[in-house]
Amino acid sequence: MFFSAREKGARLNWPGRKVMVAPDSSISVFFLMNVVMVVLLVIDGIPNPSKRAKLQRAIPTAPYVDGQTQLGLASILPHRQPQQGSPMKALKTLFVTLLLLCAPTILMAQGVEKIGVQGLRNLIDSNKGRVLIINYWATWCSPCVKEFPGLMNVRREFAESDLSIVGISVDYNPKPVENFIKQNKVNFPIFIDDGSIGSMMDIGSIPRTLIYDRQGKKILDHLGFIPEESFRHVVARLLGTP
């Protein structure tokens, strides 16, 4: 069975959010893994020993040097004494190496799920008992981007049991959103509007911020930039803290 980099990304469970692995983020590594797998299967499937040996000689090996392969992966691979490995063992080692290289890329890929009207309703219901801030934004919106540091600071100051912040992007392309999340180390969940929310709420301008109290009642629907101190003041008032 071969790996397909074009298939839907794997779902990973991060604390407080669902993450989808971006398929294109590691396509080159998956391609190399596919090539190695094909070669392994071809060599193993050749019944004629002479033809098999000829093909093996044509494929370069990856001998160990001072406990590591020529790829310089001493920090990843376990220590082994220098030895003369067979081509098949070398290829299998290369396959494992590529798999190890691919793993961090997958884990670091930050995917963004789409959300619709029903998902938004479920989100609001599931956050009853906490103050909820929903921020509609886009990567190309300067005031939106300017709001993020303040939102992230407020997120850090209040306990997750008291406050939930969710960003909903109106970007059509998820890639800029993924890059923004990674570069800015956003500390609250981000979704992308599937189009139904914008239509229902007639979101013609952004940033737009909705704030709900602990009972799930909407107490603010604001169009435009909100300073960090204003976010902090509203949250503290709703929580009954000084």
Image (cartoon, rainbow, N blue to C red):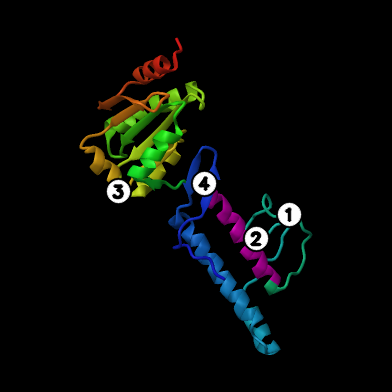
The vertical placement of 12 against 235, above or below, is: below
Give the alpha-carbon distance from disc 3 to disc 4, as whole Å.
Answer: 22 Å
Q: Where is residue 16 in the image (x, y as percent from the top left)?
A: 51, 37
State the mark number for residue 45.
Answer: none
Residue highlighted by disc 1 = 78
Residue highlighted by disc 3 = 172
Q: Is residue 171 left or right of residue 181?
A: left
- Whether pointer 1 and pointer 4 mark residues with C-beta atoms closer than 8 Å, the reply is no
What's the amino acid at mark 3?
Tyr
Q: Earlier in the sequence, mark 1 or mark 3?
A: 1
Where disc 2 sits, the SS reads: loop
What's the amino acid at mark 2?
Gln
What's the amino acid at mark 4?
Met
Where disc 4 sits, the SS reads: helix
Give the alpha-carbon distance from disc 1 to disc 4, as whole Å.
Answer: 23 Å
Q: Label 1: few (<14), some or many (≥20) within 10 Å?
A: few
Magenta part of the chain: 89-108
Q: Label 3: few (<14), some or many (≥20) within 10 Å?
A: few
Q: Residue at x 51, y 27 (%)?
A: 160
Magenta stretch: includes residue 98: yes
Q: Which of marks 4 and 2 is nearer the N terminus?
A: 2
Q: Earlier in the sequence, mark 3 or mark 4?
A: 4
Viewer-closest of 236 and 102: 236
Where disc 1 sits, the SS reads: loop
Q: Where is residue 80 in the image (x, y as percent from the top left)?
A: 77, 58
Magenta stretch: includes residue 185: no
Q: Earlier in the sequence, mark 1 or mark 4?
A: 1
Tell me the mark number nearer the camera, choosing from 1 and 3: 3
Q: Quadrant of the N terminus?
A: bottom right
State the mark number for residue 70.
Answer: 2
